[in-house]
């Protein structure tokens, strides 16, 4: 365990230095300083490769004709009849495209480069441009996130959406504007991602099919090379990218901004389905789903949950048979530019039609964000407090209570059993006196902070943050642009939900998401520790959001400490300044 002391800066005299430490599973190592940075040294390690897996022949797929071109050396044994059928099918599909492979690749590369060279833009025509507000960040990120959600459900008003549809009924928004979501991703960009990144089957990509009531996953091992993926696609297999925001900056910006609106993690999956096929069996999910149709179209059939107990479920369902789901409550064609919203528990299945492919993104929100999740945090805490302060909770159970309780005695009613139940009711009622809603909400927020994508910063915000402002290394080893924070510097929290101040066992900690990975839970939760005397200053920064305040306004006695606290937060990318910091003389 190595503890590094951060070099002092001109304004960080002696006792106000920030101590950086590494946190192992054994605990935290550091005791001094205003803020203690706690990181986890354990990073994910690669799983050992089982060589025998390459030699194992995958069973011939019965639901997809000739998908097994095998794509591994041990799987090159294909019968002549199968090979001819596969080649004919592939050739026919390429003829449908109407161009040769060379032209396809040239066009794809050109379109990919054009798409990546454009800065992220949205169709602002649907919003009030006079407000001079951007979707991603801006002077008021909270308002920006609201505007982004307005754009997402446009032309339906947000109030009507939450009144009529949220957690109640599906919603299909038809726009007749095929390029509405085009800025997010395209099939050409997906191809470029596969070529430029180490995309792995199972971790990043799934190959799926659903045929004659059978749902199968056909993932080989190793890297998902584009030629392998597209060969599966040509054989009627669907492609699902599990964490597209990791590789698509536009999608990261979209999801990270919507996190400010929902206050919880916003995930995404990307689905590419070939013409006249289906990749998944009927099922329901444990998330609120927003389906953004990017290219092509898909027929969606939606069904009620099997019973009332599965309304707003906490877990996703099994794959249903067609005989189990009844008649659809909605049978609709979702075209490019359309939006389809599915409440949790809505059974759904999608099929491509009319010889047209489909590319859509599913945004997922509100997983594990229900009242029961809050109560799971709240009630154990309340019971712990009650037990510590009220002896009634610590009294022994009645003698021989096991003789009149339990399943064997469930049908019997005795005086002793009724008294036993009344005692439990009294304790539960008394438990209400020990409920701490704020503490339970902090625990919920702690989980959300760990779930979150890192915030997306606009170019202007980057210039006012540690991301681009501050020291720069120039030629000959000369460092320039040394910046200085003063009591007059105006600062603001980077995002409302990027930090959470929590008290744990008498220790104040700031959990933060700015150093999270775009890959879900790749790192352990990150937090700072802060002395109790500085808590009012942190509270001031939090409650002032989204307004900028001067460093001197912090309710901390010493101006030097005020500056150091803000400097520590700025260096962790938790606060930004209203203008780029000035260079020190």
Image (spheres, rainbow, N blue to C red):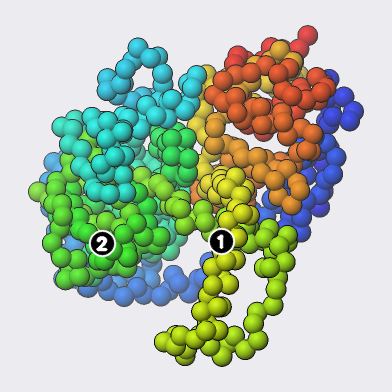
Left or right of 460 in this view: 100: left
Check contact, mark 2 vs mark 1: CB within 8 A: no
The secondary element bearing badge 2 is classed as loop
Q: Residue at x 38, y 67 (%)?
A: 73
- Name, please, the residue furthest toward the front: 415
> Which image quarter: residue 468?
top right
Q: Residue furthest left?
A: 354
Classify residue 7 as left or right of residue 198: right
Of the pair 214 and 579, the residue shown nearer to us: 579
As rendered, which of 168 and 303 lies closer to the eye?
168
Q: Is residue 500 visible?
A: yes
Quickly name the residue at label 2: 305
Measuring from the top left, give residue 100's x and y in whole percent: 19, 42
User: Which corner quadrant holds the C terminus?
Assistant: top right
Pointer 1 residue: 429
Q: Is residue 520 above or below residue 406?
A: above
């Amino acid at each position: 365990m190595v503890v590094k002391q951060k070099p002092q800066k001109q304004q960080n005299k002696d006792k106000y230095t920030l101590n950086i430490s590494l946190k192992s599973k054994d605990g935290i190592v550091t005791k001094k300083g205003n803020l203690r940075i706690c990181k986890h040294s354990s990073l994910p390690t690669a799983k050992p490769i089982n060589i025998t897996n390459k030699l194992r022949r995958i069973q011939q797929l019965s639901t997809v004709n000739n998908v097994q071109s095998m794509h591994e050396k041990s799987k090159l044994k294909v019968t002549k009849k199968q090979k001819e059928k596969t080649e004919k099918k592939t050739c026919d599909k390429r003829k449908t495209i109407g161009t040769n492979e060379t032209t396809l690749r040239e066009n794809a590369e050109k379109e990919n480069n054009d798409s990546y060279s454009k800065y992220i833009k949205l169709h602002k025509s649907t919003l009030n441009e006079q407000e001079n507000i951007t979707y991603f960040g801006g002077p008021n990120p909270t308002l920006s996130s609201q505007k982004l959600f307005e754009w997402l459900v446009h032309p339906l008003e947000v109030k009507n959406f939450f009144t009529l549809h949220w957690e109640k009924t599906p919603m299909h928004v038809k726009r007749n504007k095929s390029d509405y979501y085009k800025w997010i991703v395209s099939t050409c960009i997906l191809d470029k991602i596969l070529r430029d990144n180490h995309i792995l089957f199972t971790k990043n990509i799934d190959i799926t099919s659903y045929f004659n009531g059978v749902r199968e996953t056909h993932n080989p091992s190793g890297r998902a090379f584009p030629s392998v993926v597209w060969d599966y696609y040509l054989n009627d297999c669907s492609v699902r990218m599990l964490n597209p925001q990791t590789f698509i900056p536009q999608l990261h910006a979209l999801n990270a901004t919507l996190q400010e609106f929902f206050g919880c993690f916003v995930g995404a999956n990307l689905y590419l389905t070939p013409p006249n096929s289906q990749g998944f069996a009927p099922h329901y999910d444990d998330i609120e789903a927003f389906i953004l149709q990017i290219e092509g179209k898909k027929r969606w059939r939606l069904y009620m949950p099997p019973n009332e107990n599965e309304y707003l479920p906490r877990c996703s369902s099994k794959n249903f048979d067609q005989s189990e789901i009844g008649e659809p409550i909605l049978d609709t064609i979702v075209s490019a530019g359309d939006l389809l919203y599915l409440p949790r528990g809505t059974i759904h299945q999608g099929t491509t039609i009319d010889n047209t492919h489909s590319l859509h993104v599913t945004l997922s929100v509100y997983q594990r964000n229900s009242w029961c999740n809050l109560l799971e945090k709240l009630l154990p805490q309340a019971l712990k407090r009650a037990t510590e302060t009220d002896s009634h909770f610590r009294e022994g159970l009645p003698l021989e209570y096991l003789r009149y309780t339990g399943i064997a005695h469930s049908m019997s009613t005795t005086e002793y059993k009724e008294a036993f139940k009344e005692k439990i009711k009294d304790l539960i009622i008394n438990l209400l006196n020990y409920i701490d809603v704020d503490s339970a909400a902090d625990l919920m927020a702690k989980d959300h902070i760990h779930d979150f994508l890192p915030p997306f910063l606009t170019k202007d915000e980057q210039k006012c943050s540690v991301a681009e402002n501050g020291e720069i290394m120039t030629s000959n080893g000369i460092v320039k642009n040394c910046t200085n924070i003063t009591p007059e510097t105006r600062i603001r929290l980077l995002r409302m939900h990027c930090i959470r101040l929590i008290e744990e066992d008498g220790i104040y900690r700031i959990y933060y998401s700015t150093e999270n990975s775009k890959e879900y839970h790749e790192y352990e939760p990150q937090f700072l520790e802060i002395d109790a005397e500085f808590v009012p200053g942190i509270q001031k920064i939090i409650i002032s959001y989204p307004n900028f305040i001067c460093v001197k306004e912090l309710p901390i006695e010493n101006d030097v400490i005020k500056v150091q606290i803000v400097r520590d937060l700025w260096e962790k990318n938790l606060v930004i300044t209203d203008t780029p910091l000035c260079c020190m003389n």
